[in-house]
Image (tube, rainbow, N blue to C red):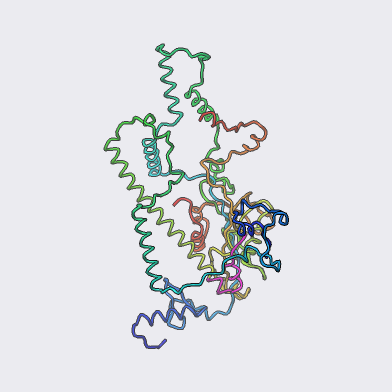
Amino acid sequence: MRLDLRAFLSQASFFPPQVCFVPYIHSRGIFTGVGGLAFRASQSLQAEPPKKKKKTDPKQEQLRQHRYLKRLKKLQYKMGKAELKPVEEMRVDRALLDEARKRDLPEIPPEEQERRALLLKRWSKFKFAQHVTETRLIEGAIKAQEKALNELRTESEELYQQAIKTDNSLFPLEGVGPTHTPAIDGFDKKVIDGVCDVTDNTDEFL
Amino acid sequence: MAAHYRFPYLRILALTQSAYKMKGSLCFKNNLVFPKHQICRFCSSSDTETRPWQLMSGVCVERYPVISQTHNSIEEEFKEMCNMVEFESSVLSDHEIQVRKDRDRMKKRKEGELEEEAGDDGEVMTALDLEDIALEKLKQFQAAPRETSADQENDTKSINRKLADKLVLLVKEKIGDKTLWILPQGYRDTGESMREAAERVLNACTIENRMKVKFVGNAPVGVYKYKYPEDIQHKIGAQGAKIFFFKAKLMQGDFMQRPDVGISEYKWVTREELDSHLIKGYSDTIKSFILPVSL
């Protein structure tokens, strides 16, 4: 029980809590005590007792819910399908849609179109064959590992359990991917010594 | 097993299910499971031998490709087509628009239409000039060649050979009375796990801190079993050896052979060259877990 003067006063004296000031009680003569026992009433004590729960028929309740949901659905249908939010990356810059930017290129001749269509077909065949080979190789590798683990298990259960433990030191795994040309021998040293200029001038050209 | 089943397939299912639960008494052949108490002509009669197998760890150190593979003809063709399509469906870039503007301005100036703007020195850097400067700078840059000197000399000990392919370390060791090319291997000491044995084997071969590798996982990637000849079986008391291979990725450095170890030679070879160095069964086992770079 806390003496919350402001809230109490707002209730007792019709002033909203923001407006209420904390008065100098004795001189103003505002009544703050409830009853003669100097009983201090706080906000929580002045709260309304909980309302009595009315017995609702479950069927009635269900019907009411059903009708409510139906009304919502009808409203949604009237409003139309929800518009998808535009994905930031998929927006084309307004400046690029300008007519002046369009290229003036001749029409692609039908022979060229034919060639391209046939090339696409050959390419899909080639890529599929690659995929099949890759899948077979991976399956072979998995089988080899399973065979190795089975053999290890027949030898010793303890070694097998040690082998199937997760290796926490594996990740983070770093790797420098293949580039078109290898690293130039001694290039880093040249850069440090100031012989090679690697200042990025691309902003000048853009 | 002799229970009566209404549907015969359920009986087979029950058979395989119960057989699966029996550990150590299964026989795998052609993706079928046979419980051993049934007539199993496919299984090796390993129940009669009492001699154990010796356990060894082998290490497959791989140097991953440094440069990308060259395109084959269809890849080249497709790449060109993709570039053409992309160009055709693109719009002019800022640089191209600037080039056009500069060209028009030059034309107008020649025809005398354009007045000289105040404060114009007459020599303004056009977009084309910038382009030329950029091209000049590019020409000055010398990239390292894709085919190295090691390629030209065919130095198989070098790690700079065949930069577009994966290289695997092979060593030449004396096994029995023969010297064979193998992956580095060694016996497992008591109290070691197989991976720890593999790490020890590799450290024993090479001089300390010259080669930095990262072992990939605790589980072996392959197994190769070979039986000792009869007299050696009696001498050692083991039936043969099981070599469990572990993969390691070469992160830094190169293999520096320790002079005191029983390795007479070493080589870094590609997957295609494995067949010419190793014996057939061993080569097939290894090739299953060394995946090629180009498919």
Q: Nearer the viewer, residue A133 or B226?
A: A133
Q: What is the residue that sits farthest to the right in this orientation?
A: A26
Residue B15 spot, x, y in % from top left:
42, 81
Q: Does A152 lie within the magenta span?
A: yes
Q: Does B150 lie within the magenta span?
A: no
- In the displayed structure, A160 sits above or below B173; it is below
Task: Give the extent of the magenta segment.
Answer: A150-168
Residue A170 spot, x, y in % from top left:
60, 58
Q: How many marks?
A: 0
Q: Is residue B216 left or right of residue A4?
A: left
Q: Is residue B200 left or right of residue B129?
A: right
Q: Residue at x 54, y 63 (%)?
A: B221
Q: Nearer the viewer, residue B197 or A72?
A: A72
Residue B21 spot, x, y in % from top left:
49, 79
Which of the 4 image quarters holds residue B110?
A: top left
Q: What is the residue that sits farthest to the top in this orientation?
A: B112
Q: Nearer the viewer, residue A172 or B288?
A: A172
Q: The N terminus of chain A lies in which quarter of the figure?
A: bottom right
Q: Residue at x 43, y 14 (%)?
A: B114
Magenta stretch prevailing secondary structure:
helix
